[in-house]
Every structure is written in C-alpha cells, then in structure tokens.
Image: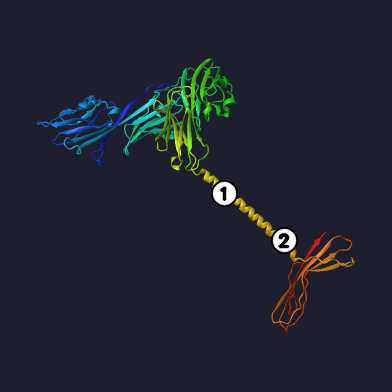
Amino acid sequence: MSAGLMLSFFVFLLRSVFTQRNPNHIYFLDERDDVSLKGPDNPGNDPVVWEWKPHSGQPIQEMGTFYKTNTGWWKVQWSDHFRNSDLYSKIQLDRGTINLRIRNSTFEFAGLFILTQEWSRNKILKQYEIFGVKFESSPQSAVVGSDVILSCTISKLSDTVSLQWKQRDSSQQNRRNTDQIRIKNTDYLMVRHVAVEDKELYVCEVQESGSVLIKADFSMTQYLDGENYTLYRSGTGHSELRLICYDYYNNYDHSYDTAEWTWRSHHLQNQEKKIASASKSELINVNRTYFGKRLVPTMANFNGKNFSVRIVPVLFEDAGVYTCSLGSTKYVIIKLITVKVTAEPSDAVTEGHNVTLTCSVSDVTESIRLVWINSDGKTVGNKTLNGWNGEEKSLRLNIQKVDRGRENWICVLFYQNRPLVLVPYYLEPSDGYTFKHTNVVIFGSLALLLIIILVVVLCLRKFKAAGLENQRQKPLQPRESREDASQLYSNANEIQQMQDTEREDIHYASVAFRKKAPDTEREDIHYASVAFRKKAPGSRHGTQGNQQSSDTNLTPSKEADSSVIYAQIAQAKFK
C-alpha cells in the first residue's frame, strides 16, 4: 500500500493567559497568517527576556534579551542557540519594541512563549501559548468506494482545549460507516467506502470557550477503470464489504453486455473463483458456494453499467483479491485484508483468572504494526510485521487477573503510523461463571424443593386414605341363609348405656347396612351415623331417631326428650 500524498495545513490557536479571568483568545486558520506576541504596555526599564518552551517536548529555549536604550527604544541580543533554530528565520521585530511577530506560522513553532525580567525569571510579565492544529488526509485523492483516513492533530491537549471529528449535517449523523479513535494528540476518523459527498461532510472541531471548525478537504475520483486499492476489515464484528464496480463515464450510449466478479482466496492460494455474473438486462447470478447468503447484489438486474455487490458480515476467511470485469476488461481490483481477535479461554472468564487475546491478520504485504490498546487509551502491546515467510501474523496479549475495570480492548492495525482498522474486543463480565453457577444452584434447589413437596403431599394423601380405611370396620360375614335380604355391620366397639350423671354424655356409632337385591349381583350399602346425648338425672329419658328423606341432612329429634339424636345417612351402591 503506497503512502499516498499528504494534504496538510496548519492552524494556530493563540491563547493569552495573562489572567485567567480575562483571557485573550485569537484563532488563526491559515498558515499564511502571522502571530503577534506583544509585551505589556509598561514593562519598566530593566532588561527582559523572551523564552520559548516548544510543545514538542524540547527544553525551554532562551530566545533573546531586550535592553532599553537611553532613547527609550529597545534593542535585542539573540542567543546563539536560538539563531540556529528554524523559528529564528520566522521572527520579525516591531522596531524599537519588545513585541514579536511570527510569520507564516508552522506546526513546529507551537508552544509556550513567556516574557520575564532578566534578573527575576519567576516574575512573568506576559505569557502566550500557541496551539498548532494539523489536518491530514490519506490518500489525498481517494477512489470512490475505497477507504479514507482523516487525522486531526493538536500540538498539545489540555483541560481547556479539545478536538474531535464531526459531521456538518446533523441529520446525516451515522449515515456513513466510520470509526474514530484518539491516539495521544491525534484524532483519527476512518471513513469506509468513501462517497463524493464525503468531501465536504466532515470537520475537525477545536473547542476552547467556543469552537473552530476545520474543514476536511480532500479530492475524489469517480473513475474506477483500472483502479487497484486495498481495504481492511474486521473479521470479528459485523463489518461490511462493498465491492463497487460502476462505469461513471457520462456516455449513456456506452454499456457492457456481460459482467462478473471473481475471488482468489488468501488462505487457499488457488485460482480465481467466479462468485457473481450477469448479462445485460438479466438477473444477476450469485454463486452461493463460498459466501452463501452473505453475498448480495445491489440491484436485481444488470443494467450494463453497475455491477456492485456487498458481503455482510465479513469473515476472516473472506480475505483475498476481488476482481470486477465489465465485458472483457478488468475494471477494478480490490484487495481485502481481514483482522480478527480470539480469546483463550473462548468463553467468559472468572474474575482474577488469566486470559490471552490474540490479534491476527490474514495477510502481510508490507510493513505494518499490530497494537493493543486498553480502555484507558494506552498502548499495552505492539508488534511490527514485515511479511517474511514463516512469520507469525499475530500479536498476543496476556491479561493477568481479569477484573471489571479492564474488560475493553482494541486491536489496531497501523500502516506508517496511521490506523487502518479497529477490532474491539469486550471480555465477558468477570462473574460470568459465578452467575451461571448461581443459576444452576437456584434452579436445582427449586426443582428439589418441588420434588420434596410432591412426595410429602402424596404421602399425606396415602396416610389419610389409610386412616379413613382404618376407621371403617371390616364387614361381618353374611349369614348362611341367603334368603335374608339384609345384614347389619357396625364399627362401634360398643353402645354405652346412658347413666344418670350430672354431665351430658355424647356417644357415637356408625352402622352400615348391606342389601342385596333379589336376582341381581348388585349390593347396596347404607351407612348411618348416630349420636346419643344424655342429660342429667331427673330429666326425661328416651331415644328416638327421626329419619329424613335426604341422605345428607342432620336433624334433631322433634320430641322433647332429654337425649338428642342426630343421624346422617349415606347410600353407596356397588355393582
């Protein structure tokens, strides 16, 4: 993959921090603008010194010392070290003053500019901080359907200064398939399958008590005839591959009678396979052998110009070379490189255990880097691959004692310090196994409890039935005379005689009558329950039963006897 042309322009943010309550902010949006560094209105008569501390991390440099002459003007003595710097050639003095002007500012000049007294360097008379902002596009001239990497870099990030990529039209948010990542002071925007309208869609926004918008400006070409480019896709997530093959020439009379897409796999290293073909005005024929239903044409019939298809989702094994032929011409060639992330163990890990993440790339044709970045944005592993034979095309990351605070990881494939594809990986919650085991214990306990309840209920029913059966006395043997139409059964041990006591006694008895109807095999059994209640001596004694017509009625004797008799009669018939 060629590095491509880089389009860069530099924007400088001039920030005065003389007082925090009254900041003076000046924005420069073109490198042709000059930056003015003015001293205080009354700096005094003592010598003063301009110092420069670059944002690049270089040591602070003494630029020059200013002395006040008898005429009231200032003259400068530049330091030897500063005379050899690139900034020196850009410095212009306001004659007779301590004011500086930086002409045609560039990104390297960003930094902190401080004016102090020579004899007391801790006494700051004036202070400015210039922030450089740089935009780059790779490639500068993009092919329709290819990927574009946009980067917006600021010389220094602070608590009050930030930057990010945005879309101009809020109604088109997330319209495009994009990824965004910040690495150090650079915000990257990866636009997949770039379209013509993307040229003016994205802006880099610098924010500090307001905002400055930097337009992402890059050129586009719609003519794919003879184009050859590389795409990078994740083979782990739900990524999409658009195979764009379209004749953009404005010749409406020109069209192709046939078209086809072929694929040569990176993994199998065999001949090209036809995956889609069509004739003009006919249905597009898709070979489902290799991609199944994941390969879908963008239109049902081939119109002689557009033969674009898409693959969703992309798998790691889809890597290879895709060629679109219109007629007898190989119109466009697209190389696909896939990246995937796997974990060992493959399922959720318990908190405190170890896990190994492996980031693999399908093919290496030039020097690339695989980098692991944690959830804090810090690089925790990297490896450079050069495509040597036998070289392992992967990067492993061993995570010790997994916890919830470090469960998000991103594998990034870089080419020349530019990210080409992001493959995020999210570890399962650290208590995944505990949760599963808890569920098993809960549901197992509930099942066991239900079984125990069922056994108890069945046993209770059995014991109850046995108790009821024991309450019934076994029937007496019938008399030998079969002409006797009825027999008497009783389960009462005895019917006690009423005694003349002052207490009231209640006696119970159950009597069963079995009757066999003449010339039939059916027996009718009649049950009766009788209760005897006795009053104290001197009262009237007697026992009378009052049989009712209903089998279930309980009725007292209507006579005014001292004993009250209740009866319940039930009839059961057996065949």
Specify whether residue 267 is in view: yes
Residue 305 seen in the current view: no
Percent from the top left, x then y, of residue 540?
75, 82
The residue tagged 1 is 441
From the top left corner, tell me how far across and down residue 65 is, in percent: 17, 31
Q: Residues within 10 Å of mark 1 (few under 14, many from 20)?
A: few
Q: Is residue 208 left or right of residue 445?
A: left
Identify the residue at horizontal 50%, vertical 44% (top origin). Answer: 431
Height in image: 127 above or below 388? below
User: Residue 573: horizontal and vertical position, in percent?
Assistant: 80, 62
Q: Identify the residue at image location x=22%, y=32%.
A: 51
Mark 2 is surrounded, within 10 Å at the Cα level, by few (under 14), some (14 to 19) or many (20 or more) other residues, namely few
Query: Is residue 490 shown left or right of residue 69?
Result: right
Quadrant location, the N terminus: top left
Apparent side of residue 367 relative to residue 453 in the rendered image (left or right): left
Q: Label 2: state its secondary structure.
A: helix
Who comes first in sequence, dot 2 or dot 1?
1
> Residue 537 in the image: x percent, y percent?
72, 83
Front position in the image: 477 or 197: 477
Residue 221: name its quadrant. top left
Residue 146 appears in which quarter of the rendering? top left
Residue hosting label 2: 465
Q: Amino acid at mark 2?
A: Ala
Residue 517 appears in which quarter of the rendering?
Answer: bottom right
